[in-house]
Image (tube, rainbow, N blue to C red):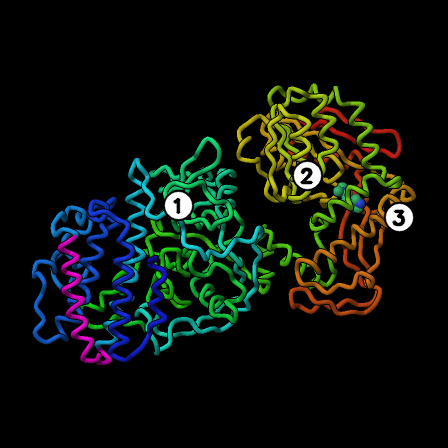
Amino acid sequence: MSPDDLHVSDTVGTAPGQDLERYRAVRRRTEALAAPLSAEDQAAQSMPDASPTKWHHGHTTWFFETFLLVPYLAGYQLFDARFGYLFNSYYEALGPRQPRPSRGLLTRPSCAEVGAYRAHVDAAMARLLAGGATEAMRQRLDLGLAHEEQHQELILMDILHLFAQSPLEPAYRSHRPTGAEPSTPVASFLPFDGGLVEIGAGPSGFAFDNERPLHKVFLAPYRLSDRLTTNGEWIAFMEAGGYGRPEFWLSEGWARVIAEGWSAPLYWRQEPVGWSAMTLEGRRPVDLAAPVTHVSYYEAAAYAAWAGRRLPTEAEWEHAARSPGQGGLAQVQGHAWQWTASPYCPYPGFRPGAGALGEYNGKFMVNQMVLRGGCLATPPGHARATYRNFFHPEKRWAFAGVRLADDGPGDVASQSDAGSETASDFLVDVLAGLSAPTKTLPSKYFYDAEGSRLFEAICDLPEYYLTRTETALLREIAPELAARLPDGAVLVEFGSGASAKTRILLDAAPQLAAYAPIDISKSALDAATATIRRDYPDLQVAALVDDFTRALRLPASVAGARAAGFFPGSTLGNFPPAEAEDFLRRAGTLLGEGGTLILGVDVAKGAEVLIPAYDDAQGVTAAFNLNVLARINRELEGTFDLQAFRHQVIWNAQESRIEMHLVSAIQQDVRVAGRRLVFAAGETIHTENSYKYRPADLAAIIERAGWRIDRRWESPAPAFAIYSLTR
Ligand code: AVI
């Protein structure tokens, strides 16, 4: 029988027979968990935190003996008076005890003797419960049963740790019980309003003392990932150099990384291809879609920092889990405990109980972090939404994983002020931009899959001269450019899109060792890197999905290599001059002293050429512009009527820029993520600037950013310029 066939919570009752049956069900489950283990397995202790199975058996039995039989069963005879010393865990009020790190030295009593101890206590408990339980007794019974269930989970945690030390890497069981909820390929962040909410267990029903009292907490709007972080996502963190980049780590966490050489979750091992992990089923290939487990709080926090998110507080987690339908969250229980950003502290009004049982939880309320949920080793029905698990932040042997959180739309101002850059900023930026007196949207949000496709179509338009002229010029000067690229260098392309122009450089410069395209659009990047890899088999391709306008960094696998930059397409023109200068300065820092940057920039010219380039006869640019509204509808629960907005192009001669706008044809209300936005008839959303630089203006920016113009080439009209910059 599988231990999980015993659903203890199904048997809750108050009659004497029901109490006994509940007791027996829990005790049987503990026996069933130990059944696959040999006597040797049950006696060994793999580390001070873990205990032998035999000790768990003795200790849970001692708990009933000490807290129920001794005080309540008249004439009860201790099985062995020495066992109090062996099996007292941490109760100071009950006297001295076997030191925790030395529990594995207890070769006596044998497993059989501990079994006899269990039988003795079980028989006495049957006598006690036959007489009916008082309220006080029932409270202790409930606690004893929940306590034994906690040890059932510990048995599995500790056995896995023990078996992971064995060169034979034994399997505790042949297969994992079914019932795991699959992970969706992409996590989405579900919004919760927060407000003044109630947290904690009410006065009725069983809960541990640390779950009480029920109290009020104020929560700002927040969002939670609808599922847990997967192993595949964790590998992306590792491949991004996550375990080697102190900027993501808490100081104490980073010290652990260094001291203990962490480079992957506990139990993971790099194989010739991919990763394996030690599991209760033995060593298995890491399942990329499964939730990551066996990570410490420090790792969880570092991962969240890398992902541009944060960990939820325990109140956020509980509020979401208690929302109708668990707020749409999947994998709430039964997969991995979820680290929260909350220290394990008493709730307001918490008072530890009197006597030894008051030591159960309260005295551990320092220096530990709360975990919520429940894991694959948690007995079914044991955990609940108010349940507070806790571990020290460096511990990794629990089945602990990650559910990411983020601030909700209510924090627009503070988020944009802080300049944080995460995928969730789409919502933040949209609400901030459309709530401002002059409505704007950042042009970087044009490039979802459909926007990237439309932009490629723009590049082929007869009116859009930029791509054509730049490509022709690149072809012409390719040998001269190639001569400026160092041997063995990595070519870093900012905003690579389809990487079409890159091929001209790659063909002319076979000395390049690697190509590192950086783009905000994963779909465009995936498609481009696949064909580049196919067509340039000797070239290392290290792609990075990122917003290069803010996070200017190299993919981990080419970090440290000599790099040359490539920034074609006049994308620099989409930045205001001050940001263009800032970008060039940061690109200089990234590429280093002596670095080279090949830059393509459009040149100021007459409106008769510029306007049609952005307002083409086929309406492709109009569709590209309007797609940002469609994207808001798709991704942010927007209600834009695309027919009610018109594409508009303006040549702003004073600023030397083309402006794209979306003009509201009528007075209208639009909703985005539940927010109401009002548009007057004729009001515009300013969606893009495209600066057309006069050579002297750009030269000044380049110089201020710390670069020198090595050479400037200009195409025949309509003019487009390519620069080779050096430092
Ligand atoms: C990507 N960027 C340089 C283009 C430009 O010309 O500003 C984007 C674009 N917008 C409308 N058409 C093309």
> Which residue is located at x 52 percent, y 60 percent?
224
> Which residue is located at x 68 percent, y 39 percent?
527
Of the image marks 3 and 2, the number of the one nearer the N terminus: 2
Tell me residue 230's x, y (percent): 49, 49
Residue wearing tag 2? 527
**Picture quadrant of ligand 1:** top right
> Which residue is located at x 20 percent, y 47 percent?
39
Q: Quadrant of the N terminus?
A: bottom left
Query: Is residue 543 left or right of 4 when viewed as pictured?
Result: right
Disc number at residue 251?
Answer: 1
The majority secondary structure of the magenta stretch comes to helix
Residue wearing tag 3? 618
* Residue 208 vs residue 604, the one in the foreground: 208
Q: Amino acid at mark 1?
A: Ser
> Which residue is located at x 78 percent, y 23 percent?
477
Question: Viewer-nearest of labels 3 and 2?
Answer: 2
Q: Amino acid at mark 3?
A: Gln
Where, by quadrant of the figure, is residue 580 drawn?
A: top right
* Residue 428 vs residue 527, the one in the foreground: 527
Tell me residue 598's x, y (percent): 70, 29
Q: Is residue 231 visible?
A: yes
- Residue 134 lies in the magenta stretch: yes
Query: Is residue 150 left or right of 535 when viewed as pictured?
Result: left
The stretch in magenta equals 112-136
In terms of secondary structure, where does tag 1 sit? helix
Of the image marks 1 and 3, the number of the one nearer the N terminus: 1
Q: Amino acid at mark 2?
A: Ala
In terms of secondary structure, where does tag 2 sit? helix
